[in-house]
Image: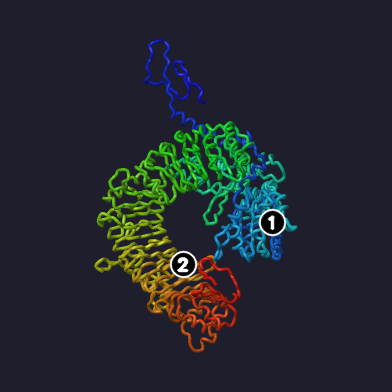
């Protein structure tokens, strides 16, 4: 294309893209040779247009040339066994097809195993046949039969030490757990318990490693422990099984695979009735799926996008089906689905083959990676950002079945790729992309056309000095086979030794054309491995993960094509960001929450008009480059923005220059004034806050230290932030508060003011409300029902020294109807925190609802010193209450005993006697702890009550620093027929009065002693203090 020529009118010939320069000097001879000028912009535009024209036929050319077979020297076995995808017990496919018989076999084996010490049951089958999905359903169905259930993804490396570390994290702790090895912790935690352990996706088997792991579940000689192993390899299944049963999952029968295929195509409308013409061709396609659920899902997602006979027939007649290597080969089906993806989705998916198969992708992480590769393009950049385009692409790939959404143990979602689909990604990208693993580095073939490289170096491949030197030699040998000067992408994964840094540094010394750098588990400085880092002028993407102290080169701020700098997974980093303003293309600068100072140090940040993360901005007092107007050009800012030192803003015009109203991607805004500033100017600060109007899309708003006297209009009578989900006001001095109901404030002279009234469309979406340090807040009145806070889940009120009333406060004289009316204000409230409100005597009832997780933490409020109520996973509901004097009816009115029927533990400290009628309501109570009480604990204790009129389910009692309680307890023993343990200062006083044997524990001058035996021993919970017996 560049060699084509054009001819001018006078017969002169010149290259395409060049023209006669009008200013070229003319020579005085017959043959004048024009001076040619090369227009880079015009040529770049032509090349870009030609590339766009080639994209639609690129997939067809790739198929014709069969490029997916080039550059891959690994055998299918090698390809499949490295870094398998991580799995979890979460069920992704809600319905299981065609596995009823196998399901019953597993259930029967688990029942039979109740009498055995340990049963190991393997489930074997080829890839994509549904082993993990089947086991997930078994796990969910049977885990209630075991006290401990554990799911571990093993992958290629069956390493007992690594698996032990994973297992110990998934078993709940026990009380008095000793600080010892992981193996000993496991044995402590499973002692006397029946255990279900799933080892998913086992590839290799070493007998010593297996015995080392499984012995942990044999030492206690507990009966009924079950280990389920899933594997593709029959040899592994035969070696691990302890019974004659070894379950083999084969392909689904024609009926079942068609039913599953039908669901993948039509969803809930599982019927061909509306598409009779597709039935016959659909049946023929099902025949080609080899009974594989993965193939059915992938091809089904492809077909459901176009329910036309032409499209389905084209899929059926594709020549890709002819490339199958054996009767179980489903790769042609997967490749067929890939070929029918649009070109932009093919690009996005294929580059994911550079990541290890066990990689858990975040949505933003993937999009940023694609931006770095420059494969995202928006036709209308004013309306749709590249990030929005990328998220649409990711959604499309999920809908086509190439990604699946999983959940981590903490509940956060991540995206994963099935191992066979990852293998497909590696194959289709093998012309340009190459993934090298330390275990197969020596023999891998490296094509000269490789532009994108990932290397995974695993420490498990280094077992001694010889293997270390062998791996180091293999890395050095890459220099002769790899043309690093052509590399555009470099990705390093794995826990590799720092000793390889020198070797890798020498290898990549000439890699100066890099666009994308991803360094995982980096234990070195960037220039150690990229010695010519300052020459990476084309770099667009830099991501580093490290648990070590790193130092980034200053040359980073001179790489002007950078669009993504991701340091959010770096524990400690030394780097000056002051001059990053020159990186005018920068879109993302990600740092850890505790390192937001990197953002605030950027001088003249307003030049970075594409920047989307600016976690912290401090307004400078005098120096230019840190004034509030720097925020004005940053229209793309999203996520969270903290603006501090607003006392340095002098005028409302300066505040207007921040243009917060135009930042429609911003979700969280913090506006802070320095509370230690020497002087406050209420009028100035009032004007400044009134001009800092955020966009209506804002979801979280925090205002702290504001010295004005009024709530800004945009948060009050002219409420513009109606989408708020979180509102936090801290240390404000306002006479009127936002429209939260009937709120009364008081000034320094004692004059009261009423706040804004409730508006019809107020804070309807509010989920969290925090009011802290508002000394003017006096009364928040609840008159009648209110639906304003129908979504509120968290309410925090701290340091409101004048507060005397809340909407759901009620005095002891409050009737039931009034209580219900007041509680209608917060129907979904789950967490309540009230602290340091000494004048607030009337509190809401605890708990305020039943049959839902609630928590309350009340401190230094009214007559309550501290009340703590909540659900603990190990022990259930627990209530701890400490009084500080006052009337008994006022103190006990804080508790709504009718909602405490599920309470398991009760701790009382410095409390007045508890009426027996209220105590009787606690039908699930198992443990009582009493401290610092000098009089009776229960009322009344007289007459016939000591003859067993009351029966309580309490099993444990602990009493400390009490003068008369032990004597009282001797009179109440008939009330506690289930008592099996008593501990405290004078527990021995009970011994003459016992009708059955219990465990007694007490402390005295001679230390700890114990008497008797516990009638029904049980595991103690970690948060309960158990004194030595």
Is 391 rendered above or below residue 1003? Answer: above
Give the image location of residue 822, x and y in percent.
40, 72
Number of residues whose C-alpha sits closer than 10 Å to that of mark 1, classed few (under 14), some (14–19) or many (20 or more): some
Image-quadrant location for residue 767: bottom left
Give the image location of residue 616, x and y in percent.
38, 50
Residue 158 shown left or right of residue 743 in the figure: right
Residue 306 shown left or right of residue 666 in the figure: right
Which residue is at a point 43% across and 63% down the rendered structure image?
Answer: 794
Is 892 rendered above or below residue 326? Answer: below
> Badge 2 is on which residue?
855
* Label 2 SS: strand
Give the image location of residue 64, x and y in percent.
63, 34
Compare residues 1013 and 776 and report the one nearer the observer. 1013
In this view, which residue lies farthest toward the right?
244
* Label 1 SS: loop
- Reading the chain from its start, which is encountered first: label 2 or label 1? 1
Compare residues 887 and 380 and report the one nearer the observer. 887
> Badge 1 is on which residue?
98
Compare residues 769 and 742 and report the one nearer the observer. 769
Number of residues whose C-alpha sits closer than 10 Å to that of mark 2, classed few (under 14), some (14–19) or many (20 or more): many
């Amino acid at each position: 294309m560049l060699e084509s020529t054009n001819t001018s009118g006078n017969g002169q010939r010149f290259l395409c893209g060049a023209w006669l320069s009008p200013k070229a000097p003319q020579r005085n001879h017959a043959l004048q040779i024009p001076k040619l000028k090369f227009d880079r912009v015009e040529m770049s535009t032509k090349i870009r247009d030609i590339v766009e024209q080639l994209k639609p036929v690129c997939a067809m050319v790739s198929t014709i040339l069969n490029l997916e077979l080039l550059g891959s020297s690994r055998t299918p076995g090698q390809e499949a066994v490295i870094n398998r995808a991580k799995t979890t017990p979460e069920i992704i496919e809600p319905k299981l097809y065609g596995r009823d018989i196998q399901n019953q076999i597993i259930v029967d084996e688990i029942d039979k195993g109740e009498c055995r010490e340990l049963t190991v049951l393997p489930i074997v089958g080829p890839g994509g046949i549904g082993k993990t999905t089947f086991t997930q359903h078994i796990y969910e169905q049977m885990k209630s039969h075991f006290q401990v259930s554990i799911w571990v993804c093993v992958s290629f490396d069956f390493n007992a030490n690594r698996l032990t570390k994973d297992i110990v994290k998934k078993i709940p702790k026990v009380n008095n757990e000793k600080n010892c090895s992981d193996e000993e912790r496991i044995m402590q935690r499973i002692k006397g318990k029946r255990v279900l352990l799933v080892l998913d996706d086992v590839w290799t088997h070493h007998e010593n490693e297996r015995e080392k792991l499984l012995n942990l579940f044999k030492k206690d000689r507990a009966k009924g422990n079950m280990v389920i192993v899933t594997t593709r390899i029959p040899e592994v299944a035969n070696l691990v099984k302890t019974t004659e049963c070894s379950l083999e999952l084969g392909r689904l029968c024609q009926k079942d695979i068609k039913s599953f295929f039908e669901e993948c195509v039509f969803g809930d409308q599982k019927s061909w009735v509306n598409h009779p013409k597709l039935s016959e061709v659909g049946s023929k396609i099902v025949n080609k799926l080899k009974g594989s659920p993965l193939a059915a899902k992938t091809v089904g997602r492809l077909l459901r996008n176009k329910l036309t006979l032409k499209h389905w027939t084209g899929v059926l007649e594709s020549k890709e089906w002819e490339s199958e290597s054996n009767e179980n080969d489903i790769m042609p089906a997967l490749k067929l689905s890939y070929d029918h993806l649009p070109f932009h989705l093919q690009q996005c998916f294929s580059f994911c083959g550079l990541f290890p198969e066990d990689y858990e992708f975040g949505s933003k992480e993937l999009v940023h990676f694609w931006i770095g590769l420059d494969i995202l393009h928006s036709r209308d950049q004013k309306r749709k950002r590249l990030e929005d385009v990328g998220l649409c692409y990711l959604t499309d790939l999920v809908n086509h079945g190439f990604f699946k959404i999983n959940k981590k143990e903490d509940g956060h979602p991540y995206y994963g790729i099935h191992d066979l689909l990852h293998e497909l990604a590696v194959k289709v990208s093998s012309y340009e992309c190459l993934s090298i693993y330390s275990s197969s580095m020596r023999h891998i073939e490296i094509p000269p056309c490789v532009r994108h490289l990932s290397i995974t170096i695993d420490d498990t491949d280094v077992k001694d000095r010889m293997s270390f030197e062998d791996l180091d030699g293999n890395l050095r040998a890459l220099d002769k086979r790899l043309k690093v000067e052509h590399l555009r992408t470099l990705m390093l994964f794995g826990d590799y030794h720092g000793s390889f840094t020198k070797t890798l540094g020498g290898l990549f010394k000439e890699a100066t054309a890099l666009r994308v750098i991803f360094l995982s588990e980096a234990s070195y400085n960037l220039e150690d491995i990229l010695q010519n880092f300052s020459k990476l002028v084309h770099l667009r993407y830099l991501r580093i993960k490290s648990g070590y102290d790193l130092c980034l080169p200053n040359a980073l701020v001179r790489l002007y094509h950078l669009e993504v700098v991701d340091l959010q997974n770096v524990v400690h980093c030394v780097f000056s960001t002051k001059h990053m303003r020159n990186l005018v293309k920068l879109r993302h600068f990600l740092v850890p929450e505790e390192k937001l100072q990197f953002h605030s140090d950027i001088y003249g940040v307003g030049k970075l008009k594409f920047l989307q993360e600016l976690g912290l901005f401090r307004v400078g007092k005098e120096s230019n480059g840190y004034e509030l107007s720097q925020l004005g050009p940053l229209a793309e800012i999203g996520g969270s923005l903290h603006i501090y030192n607003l006392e340095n803003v002098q005028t409302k015009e300066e505040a207007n220059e921040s243009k917060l109203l135009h930042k429609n991607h911003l979700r969280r805004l913090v506006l802070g004034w320095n509370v230690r500033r020497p002087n406050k100017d209420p009028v100035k600060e009032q004007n400044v806050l009134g001009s800092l109007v955020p966009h209506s899309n804002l979801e979280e708003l925090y205002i702290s230290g504001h010295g004005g006297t009024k709530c800004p209009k945009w948060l009050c009578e002219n409420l513009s932030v109606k989408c708020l989900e979180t509102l936090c006001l801290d240390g404000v001095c306002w006479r009127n508060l936002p429209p939260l109901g009937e709120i009364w404030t008081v000034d320094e002279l004692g004059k009261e003011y009423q706040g804004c009234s409730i508006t019809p469309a107020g804070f309807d979406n509010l989920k969290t409300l925090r009011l802290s340090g508002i000394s003017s807040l006096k009364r928040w009145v609840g008159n009648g029902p209110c639906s304003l806070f129908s979504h509120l889940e968290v309410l925090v009120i701290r340091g409101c020294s004048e507060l005397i009333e809340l909407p759901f406060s009620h005095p002891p004289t409050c009737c039931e109807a009034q209580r219900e009316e007041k509680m209608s204000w917060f129907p979904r409230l789950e967490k309540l925190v009230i602290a340091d409100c000494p004048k607030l005597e009337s509190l809401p009832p605890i708990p305020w609802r039943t049959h839902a997780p609630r928590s309350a933490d009340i401190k230094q409020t009214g007559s309550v010193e501290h009340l703590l109520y909540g659900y603990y996973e190990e022990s259930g509901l627990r209530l701890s209450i400490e009084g500080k004097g006052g009337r008994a009816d006022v103190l006990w009115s804080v508790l709504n005993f009718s909602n405490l029927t599920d309470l398991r533990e009760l701790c009382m400290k410095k409390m007045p006697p508890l009426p027996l009628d209220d105590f009787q309501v606690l039908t699930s109570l198992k443990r009582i702890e009493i401290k610092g009480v000098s009089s009776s604990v229960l009322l009344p204790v007289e007459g016939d009550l000591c003859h067993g009129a009351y029966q309580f389910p309490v099993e444990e009692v602990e009493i400390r620093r009490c003068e008369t309680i032990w004597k009282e307890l001797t009179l109440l023993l008939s009330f506690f027929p289930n008592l099996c343990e008593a501990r405290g200062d004078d527990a021995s006083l009970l011994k003459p009065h016992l009708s059955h044997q219990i465990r007694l524990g007490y402390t005295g001058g001679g230390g700890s002693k114990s008497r008797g035996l516990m009638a029904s021993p049980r595991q103690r919970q970690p948060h309960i203090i158990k004194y030595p017996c």
